[in-house]
Image (cartoon, helix red, strand yellow):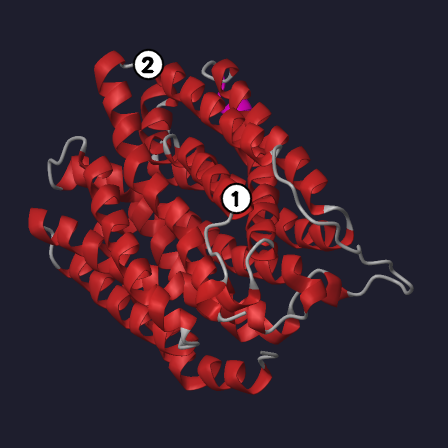
Amino acid sequence: MGEKSEKLWNTNYLKVWTANFMLFFSFMVLTPLLPLYMSETYGAGKHTIGLVLSGYTLTALLVRSLSGYLVDRFPRKIVLLICYALFCIFFMGYFFTAWSLLMFTILRTLHGAPFGAVTVANSTVAIDVLHPSRRAEGIGYYGLSNNIATAISPSVGLYIYQACGNYNMIFLLSVICSAIGLCIDSTLKLPPRPVIKEKKKLSFDRFFLFNGWSEGISLSCFAFSYGILSTYLAIYGKEKLGILGGTGLFFMILSIGLILSRLIGSHSLREGKIVQNVSVGILISLCGYLLFAAFHTFWAYYGAALIIGLGNGHMFPGFQNMFVNLASHTQRGTANSMLLTSWDLGIGMGILAGGTIAETSGYSAAFWWAWIINACGVIFFFAYVRKNYLKNKLR
């Protein structure tokens, strides 16, 4: 059949798309408010906030590679449902941690494990249910579920907090949304897939996509920048610019940019212009981080959101296609885990380093470092990563 005759938005794809939306909505409705929550509830300083919030990224990072192996080795639906259920259950623990920063730290750190695993499992299932001729395009549209959730959820969380001043209402919303996503994924009807039967000792290539090491380093640089920006955005806007409740609008504008660029870039992805998509995206994002770091004004604050969104919307689906194209069909889970591991590693380093830099040198220095590391990633991509990908891709 021709490409146009193959259905992109099939029933299973719609289900995993919606479940991913609920996953990220439940996560992102809470995440931008956590620095304020820790500051108001525990009196935590900038360095402590950075240290605590980087914990979930560390556990997600550690679990990514294992979860990639599990979704390749065992029935993917079973792995997906177990991970999603644990992700939902952990949200319930936030109701009982207000009395102890230590308990919150432990819970938040452990919560990264099911989050890391379920994102790998759900995205791998999404690739499985797409026809090969629509896969590159479908991967791009799949990311819209993250983007739309990110656009809506921070505003919803801020509205609830401003209306009732109660973080427990936001925790409850996260529980409900993640439970809905779990129920949706439970209705998936996936064709039987032969699982991998190991005939030899486990090797590192079952956990890491070595062909994608350079892509991973480059992506981590871009994630480092985003980790600093997204984590310290609310406190920076409130303390330095007097923008109260502006985080929701920032993420909404950023997500509008993401959505627009994904819609525009889906056509070029369908034509196989993967490297071009990434190249355009990282250059646009670099300009956005420069604007945010160099100009401390209302217009630069929100203008950077749109520019970074436009850039990341081109960049991320392009990178995901690169990882998938570097892997064999039996390593789709490993490819997805490598993608997300690289992103988590950069995010975690950005959160941790950003808190330390902001504590010692201020927010301006932290955001300049975000731009510098981003620029290093751009240089490395054009100097080495592009050629490495074109040389090693399998399809």
Is 101 covered by the magenta stretch? Answer: yes
Q: Please report the residue visible at 32 percent of the width from the left and 46 percent of the height from the top.
A: 230
Q: Secondary structure at mark 2?
A: loop
**Of the pair 8 and 365, the residue shown nearer to us:** 8
**Residue 104 makes an appearance in the image:** yes
Callouts 2 and 1 close, C-beta under 8 Å = no
Tell me where residue 360 appears, x and y as whole percent: 31, 48
Tell me where residue 320 appears, x and y as whole percent: 49, 63
Start-end of magenta stretch: 100-104
Q: What is the total number of numbered labels drawn onto the structure image? A: 2
- Distance CA(mark 2)–CA(mark 1): 38 Å
Q: Nearer the viewer, mark 2 or mark 1?
A: 1
Check disc 2: other Cα within 10 Å, few if <14, some if 14-19, many if 20+. few
**Of the pair 27 and 6, the residue shown nearer to us:** 6
Q: Secondary structure at mark 1?
A: helix
The residue at which mark 1 appears reads as 11
Tell me where residue 118 appears, x and y as whole percent: 59, 42
The residue at which mark 2 appears reads as 166
**Residue 370 makes an appearance in the image:** no
Is 254 covered by the magenta stretch? Answer: no
> Looking at the picture, does residue 336 appear above or below residue 117?
below
Q: Please report the residue visible at 43 percent of the width from the left and 48 percent of the height from the top.
A: 352
Does residue 43 appear left or right of residue 137 in this picture? left
> Magenta stretch: dominant SS?
helix
Q: Which mark is residue 131?
A: none
> Looking at the picture, does residue 31 appear above or below residue 138?
above
State which quadrant residue 40 falls in. Answer: top left
